[in-house]
Image (tube, grey):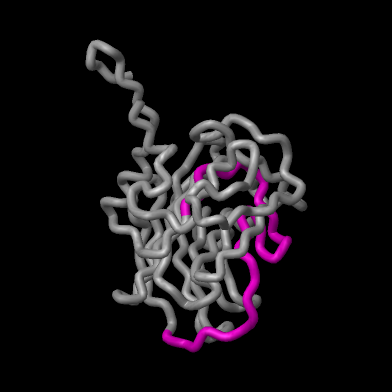
Amino acid sequence: TLDTTTDTAYPIANLAYYKLNGDALDSSGNGYNGIASNLSPYAAGRFGQAAVFNGSSSYVSASIPFLNAKVTSAVSLWIKYTDTVAYKTVFVDYSSGSNWNHNIIVNQPSTGNLRFFSAYGGSAGYVTLETSGLTLNDGNWHHIVSTLDLSQNTLTGYVDGVSVGSLNPSANTWTGSTQNLQIGAYAGTTNFNGSIDQVRIFSSALTAGNVTSLYNESTVVESTDGTDS
């Protein structure tokens, strides 16, 4: 069995890996287990099971001290939803209310279905990348990646393996007290309504090739005659 979904260092070392197969445990071995709040029963996911968020009170919270600073990092996950309500948070890691490495919101109403945020030092440091012309709330699984490379000063977003653009984060100073990252909500608000699966967090940036690998990850079973299924 050649199963990339069980590889906790795929395609590069994972800082944290939430398979969301009935729980919010970290499969990376680094011990960053999440705490699930008001999740609906787990359902069929992109791989195995997925966490189902109710749109009002569901989220997963986890403490990863590495992310409570302005750092090169990346997040990869799968989402499925049909909700049309604006400003629903898929993922955020932050230190105080105005500092984020990654903040991913669906149903951004002004230009498209998805918005990638990065912010340092309050409102003066906001940078946003908004998609246009995408239909993500179609009830199908979609792969989302946000990668922040401070050596290149770029935040790049990907949807279903394809880059939707890059932008340059502000040079403003990171300030504020630390808080946990959240999957499916922002500070317990703007709760996501749908399913999230395979949340991988990285302490490094992802290349386009890494993103392609994640988009194509799968379970392949090799039979005794050498063929794959």
Give coordinates of residue 69: x percent, y percent: 51, 77
Give coordinates of residue 196: x percent, y percent: 57, 44
Q: Nearer the viewer, residue 128 or 134?
A: 128
Quarter occupied by residue 167: bottom left
Residue range of the region highlighted in magenta in the rendering: 171-200
- Residue shown at 37% from the left, 55% from the top: 13
Q: Count of labels shown?
A: 0
Give coordinates of residue 148: x percent, y percent: 40, 68
- Residue shown at 33% from the left, 30% from the top: 2
Quarter occupied by residue 129: bottom left
Q: Nearer the viewer, residue 72 or 125?
A: 72
Is 107 placed above or below 186 here? above
Q: Is residue 123 left or right of residue 147?
A: right
**Figure quadrant of the C terminus:** top left
Q: Nearer the viewer, residue 9 or 160?
A: 9
**Residue 177 shown in magenta:** yes
* Residue furthest bottom as drawn: 173
- Residue shown at 72% from the left, 61% from the top: 189
Residue 131 visible? The answer is no
